[in-house]
Image (cartoon, rainbow, N blue to C red):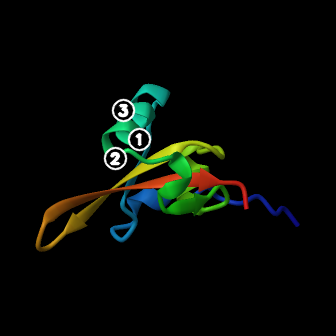
Amino acid sequence: MDKKRKKIDIFCHELVPKHELLSKEEAEKLLKKLNIYPEQLPWIKKSDPAAVAIGAKPGDIVKIIRKSPTAGETVVYRYVIDK
């Protein structure tokens, strides 16, 4: 029996917000602006399906853009951890 799995694009689902990896320069600029260390951001595991889909590695910062009925668009950041 062939157990090939069909790859599904999770970002096609309406409830999954857009995820983007920040470049090192963008991450440094964000951390300087917020005057924080990366570990002080909320965390996202490297095994999270969205993190896997964008190729996030521990130490990266992910920008998540959510649609909001009241605010229009909300941007949050997550620090990728290994656990």
Measured Cα–Cα span from mark 1 to mark 2: 5 Å
Residue drawn at x 59%, y 45% as measured from the top left: 56
Q: Nearer the viewer, mark 2 or mark 3?
A: 2
Q: Provide residue 1's location: percent of width, then percent of height.
A: 88, 67
Where is residue 65, by image quadrant? bottom left
Measured Cα–Cα span from mark 3 to mark 1: 6 Å
In terms of depth relative to the viewer, which is nearer, 78 or 39? Answer: 39
Q: From what the image shows, is residue 9 above or below residue 57?
A: below
Residue type (three-letter) at the residue carrying disc 3: Lys
Q: Residue 29: which disc? A: 3
Label 2 or label 3, whichever comes before in sequence order: 3
In terms of depth relative to the viewer, which is nearer, 8 or 74? Answer: 74
Residue drawn at x 53%, y 52% as measured from the top left: 79
Q: Residues within 10 Å of mark 3 (few under 14, many from 20)?
A: few
- Residue receiving disc 2: 34
Residue type (three-letter) at the residue carrying disc 1: Leu
Residue drawn at x 52%, y 47% as measured from the top left: 38
Give the quadrant of the C terminus: bottom right
Q: Residue 31: which disc? A: 1
Residue type (three-letter) at the residue carrying disc 2: Leu
In terms of depth relative to the viewer, which is nearer, 15 or 59? Answer: 59
Measured Cα–Cα span from mark 2 to mark 3: 9 Å
In this rendering, does residue 9 appear at all?
no
Is label 3 in contact with label 1 (beta carbons under 8 Å)?
yes
Q: Provide residue 70's location: percent of width, then percent of height.
A: 11, 73
Check disc 2 and report its element: helix, strand or loop: helix
Is label 1 in contact with label 2 (beta carbons under 8 Å)?
yes
In terms of depth relative to the viewer, which is nearer, 38 or 77? Answer: 38
Q: From what the image shows, is residue 68 above or below residue 11?
A: below
Q: Provide residue 72's location: percent of width, then percent of height.
A: 13, 63
